[in-house]
Amino acid sequence: MTKVQKLSPFGALAIMFLAVAWSFLPFDFAEGVRCGPPLLGGKPESEQPVGLILPEQDCLAKAKSRLLVSSMISLAAIGTATAVVALKPITGQCSRGDHEDCPAWWANLLSENDSGFGCQCECHSN
């Protein structure tokens, strides 16, 4: 595994931690209504309507939106870290241009054009 592959789960955990912390922060709705943390229900500090804003309904809707955003950010971080760990790195031989010294070969079962074996390196065509 490369260094990036080893560190990507920790990066995903850090992003998830920030997303959860963001959902614990209280927020203002339309600069007129103070709402509680989204993860705790987004309860408004005051039930008094401000203009067309109904604090009980609007704080709840905005809290749900903030929770959805933080969950999608967490999901994207997990997916990215999983892809980084799952993808095979380009070998040193491939990046140096030593295409004949490819250390790992596999059967070309997915293509009818090539028979025999193909190199795992992404820079090889067969």
Image (cartoon, rainbow, N blue to C red):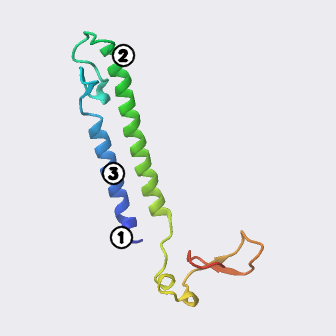
Question: x, y (%) of residue 70?
Answer: 37, 39
Question: x, y (%) of residue 80?
Answer: 44, 55
Mark 1 residue element:
helix
Mark 3 residue element:
helix
Task: Specify few, some or many for label 1: CA neighbours under 10 Å numbering under 14, 14-19, or 20 or more.
Answer: few
**Does residue 49 lie above or below 70 as drawn?**
above
* Quadrant of the rendered image containing residue 74: top left
Q: Residue at x 32, y 23 (%)?
A: 41
| In front: label 1 or label 2 | 2
Amino acid type of the residue tagged 3 in the rendering? Leu
Cα–Cα span, label 3 and label 1 = 16 Å
Q: Residue at x 31, y 28 (%)?
A: 38
**Does residue 64 lie above or below 84 as drawn?**
above
Residue ID for mark 1: 3
Task: Specify few, some or many for label 2: CA neighbours under 10 Å numbering under 14, 14-19, or 20 or more.
Answer: some
Q: Residue at x 42, y 51 (%)?
A: 78
Q: Are marks 1 and 2 in contact (CB under 8 Å)?
A: no
Of callouts 3 and 2, which one flags the residue occurring earlier in the amino acid sequence?
Answer: 3
Report the side of 100 relative to 8 (left or right): right
Mark 2 residue element:
helix
Total marks drawn?
3
